[in-house]
Image (cartoon, grey):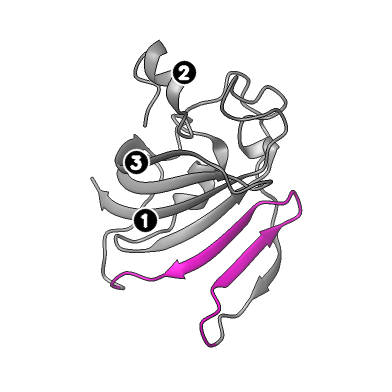
């Protein structure tokens, strides 16, 4: 699930730090849809980044904030064909310090333990024009279903 070795990197690639990290951050949300019967709440940014609230954990659950170590389970898919390129039942990283792609640093912040979100990350908040050889094509929009498991 993580770039732990060259062998693992060839297999599957989580949202590890891209070689050239774009400095673009999501701009102010341009549209927010209210959740209706069975519809997730969606926040959309000008650059194409989206956060879909799929499920809410307990309101008193631990909050994911920059600098905290978070654990998540996730499934990563290419938006173009829904092909799963990576998944993990327990992946940990320090939030907001660039250990993962920018879309994750932005999209996981503010979650509480038990929350589930779908993050739609444009190339500028993913792996950009480089992609990841053999796994993620250049300029790919990525979708991640993420559940926050723990915050330390």
Q: Quadrant of the C terminus?
A: top left
How far from the left and from the top, in percent, is residue 108? 45, 51
Q: Residue at x 60, y 68 (%)?
A: 42
Query: Helix or strand or loop: what does disc 2 sit on?
Result: helix
Q: Residue at x 44, y 23 (%)?
A: 11
Q: Nearer the viewer, mark 3 or mark 1?
A: 3
Q: Quadrant of the N terminus?
A: top left
- Cα distance, mark 1 to mark 2? 25 Å
Query: In the depicted view, which residue is nearer to us: 142 or 105?
Result: 142
Q: Is residue 129 above or below residue 77?
A: above
Q: Is residue 58 above or below residue 35?
A: above
Query: In the depicted view, which residue is nearer to us: 11 or 57?
Result: 11
Label annotation for residue 147: 1
Q: Is residue 43 above or below residue 14?
A: below
In reply to whether residue 43 is colored magenta, the answer given is yes
Q: Dot 2, how many residues are within 10 Å of its Cα: few (below 14), some (14-19), or many (20+)?
A: few
Region in magenta:
37-58
């Amino acid at each position: 699930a993580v770039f732990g070795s060259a062998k693992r990197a060839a297999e599957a690639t989580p949202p590890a730090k891209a070689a050239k990290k774009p400095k673009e951050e999501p701009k102010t949300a341009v549209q927010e849809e209210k959740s209706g019967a069975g519809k997730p709440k969606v926040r959309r940014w000008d650059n194409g980044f989206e956060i879909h609230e799929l499920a809410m954990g307990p309101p008193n659950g631990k909050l994911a904030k920059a600098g905290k170590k978070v654990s998540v389970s996730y499934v990563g898919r290419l938006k173009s064909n829904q092909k799963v390129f990576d998944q993990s039942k327990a992946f940990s990283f320090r939030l907001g310090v660039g250990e993962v792609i920018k879309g994750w640093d932005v999209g996981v912040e503010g979650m509480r333990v038990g929350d589930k979100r779908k993050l739609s990350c444009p190339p500028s908040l993913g792996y950009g024009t480089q992609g990841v050889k053999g796994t993620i094509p250049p300029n790919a929009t990525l979708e991640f279903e993420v559940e926050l498991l723990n915050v330390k």
